[in-house]
Image: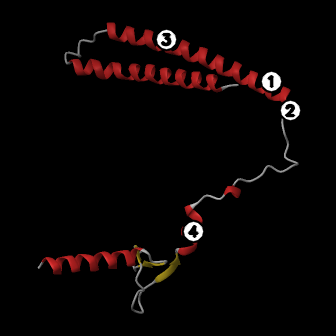
Amino acid sequence: MKLQRLFFLATLLFLSTRVCNADVMYQCIDERGHKSFSNLKPSGKGSNCVSMDLSASSASSSKPSAQSRTETPANFPKVDQNSQRARDGDRRRILESELESEQKSLDLSKKKLAEQEDLRNGDERNYQRVLDRLQPFKDKIALHERNIEAIQREISNLR
């Protein structure tokens, strides 16, 4: 009995490795537009199948080509170093002014949240209503904090 199982498993393993090494696959589209793929040649006249050769694509996709990078043309316009420094300086000034503006907006949003936390409406006996009312103010503060972090990252990435 064990010998039969062992023979069956060995045969199954052999057949599955044979199937996995197929170089040709068939893409079939049925009448409803569903795609199916098979390594066996379709039988029947009504099958709408196209063969796909996998041998060329597997060899080219295994290793990226060293020449896949395109070279910059010789007549490609280049920016001189002084112009680039001026552009970088302008960018730094713009980012710093945006950072200052975001920090002012953050301070204002925190002040508005504090005012809303001190305010109690008579219809808010349930604390969840208070939390629901305060949530947009907390979201605005979180947005300004994320913007400040992003601007600071941009400034640190400058040369």
Q: What's under tag 4, amino acid-wise?
A: Ala
Q: Label 4 to label 1, Cα distance in Å?
A: 48 Å
Q: As drawn, is 102 to the left or to the right of 34?
A: right
Q: How many marks?
A: 4
Q: 119 or 1, which lies in front? A: 1
Q: Answer whether labels 4 and 3 touch (C-beta < 8 Å).
A: no
Number of the front mark, 4 or 3: 4
Q: Answer whether labels 1 and 2 touch (C-beta < 8 Å).
A: no
Residue 108: mark:
3
Q: Label 1 to label 2, Cα distance in Å?
A: 10 Å
Number of the front mark, 4 or 1: 4
Q: Answer whether labels 1 and 3 touch (C-beta < 8 Å).
A: no
Badge 3 marks a residue whose secondary structure is: helix
Question: Sequence order check: which comes first, mark 2 or mark 3?
Answer: 2
Q: Label 4 to label 2, Cα distance in Å?
A: 43 Å
Counting from the top left corner in percent of width and height, residue 12 is at 28, 77
Q: 29 or 23, which lies in front? A: 23
Task: Residue at 19% x, 18% y: name it.
Answer: 126
Task: Residue at 36% x, 11% y: name it.
Answer: 116
In this figure, which residue is indicated by the disc labeled 1? 86
Number of the front mark, 2 or 3: 2
Q: As drawn, is 86 to the left or to the right of 143?
A: right
Question: Sequence order check: which comes first, mark 1 or mark 3?
Answer: 1
In this figure, which residue is indicated by the disc labeled 4? 59
Rendered position, 135 above or below 33? above
- Please state, as top left, top right, bottom left or bottom right, where the C terminus lies in the image: top right
Residue 138 position by quadrant = top left
Q: What's under tag 3, amino acid-wise?
A: Leu
Residue 9 at least partly seen:
yes
Residue 80: mark:
2
